[in-house]
Amino acid sequence: MRDDLRKEFNDKIWHGQQDESRSGAGSTLAFTERLRAQLPAFLEKHGVGTFLDAPCGDWNWMASVDLGDIQYIGGDIADAVVEEVRAAHGGPNRDFILLDITSDPLPKADMMMARDVLFHLKFWLRWKFLENFVASGTPLLLTTMHHIKANKKLGKNGGFTKFNPMAAPFNFPAPIDMIHETADDLPADIAERDEGRKHRSMGLWTREQIIAVLDARAAAKAAEEVGA
């Protein structure tokens, strides 16, 4: 576990409707209405029996999601959060663990959800997470994507900047599936439109797609070294 990240996030109170969720405005019941409604069927569609949710936050919205018989593992880097959610929501098929997604071994699952986290990390830590995800063997990654044209660098871990995995320097391919969080439907070219900045979705990528992204990055770095 990276001690600097643990210190940064352990006692963090995100700006927003803090009276409802200490995890921020993106974790309120109102904001997650579409995601909560669609997630159970989405998990069933993709054959998910074991679901890793990291960071799990304070479980404000997940508490109202019907997970059925799915084995749920919630991970978070904040000690206090893990202790609180374990006491309040732990039980059969629900486990909560202390976890740094950028450095700790990730439990293998059928799908991992990394929601509202990568946009709080510097680029190099986003890459570390992707490498860590691939190493876990989990076949599917569900993560936040903003429909913007370009990614901006983050000045400090724990800050915020909108993130589109499909934009440079990450250059993900199109996701195999999506859950839109801010609209019932969005046009395929939403990132090219001005209104794209207002919208976000949860994009689903395969492990093979992410391996290809990492391979492309390694090849580009090797080419730069040869040309230097």
Image: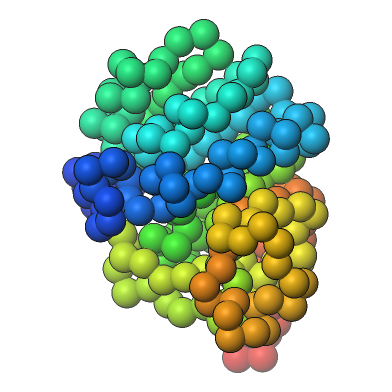
Residue 159 appears in the picture as rendered = yes
Quadrant of the frame with the C terminus: bottom right
For the point 38% across and 35% down, the residue is: 60
For the point 43% across and 42% down, the residue is: 29
Q: Nearer the viewer, residue 177 or 138?
A: 177
For the point 76% across and 65% down, the residue is: 174
Q: Residue furthest top?
A: 92
Give the mark count: 0
The colouring scheme, among rainbow, by chain, secondary structure or one colour, is: rainbow
Residue 225 appears in the picture as rendered = no
Give residue 224's quadrant in the image. bottom right
Q: Nearer the viewer, residue 228 or 95?
A: 95
Q: Where does residue 72 sit, x and y in percent of width and height?
A: 56, 23
Quadrant of the frame with the N terminus: top left
Q: Residue furthest bottom?
A: 228
In the displayed structure, 9 sits above or below 168; it is above
In the displayed structure, 182 sits above or below 69; it is below
Q: Is residue 90 left or right of residue 14?
A: right
Give residue 136's quadrant in the image. top right
Q: Is residue 175 left or right of residue 3?
A: right
Q: Where does residue 134 sit, x and y in percent of width and height?
A: 66, 46
Q: Nearer the viewer, residue 142 or 155?
A: 142
Q: Is residue 39 left or right of residue 6?
A: right
Q: Is residue 154 left or right of residue 10?
A: right
Q: Nearer the viewer, residue 119 or 214?
A: 119
Q: Where does residue 172 sit, x and y in percent of width and height?
A: 70, 66
For the point 50% across and 47% down, the residue is: 32
Q: Where does residue 192 sit, x and y in percent of width and height?
A: 67, 84
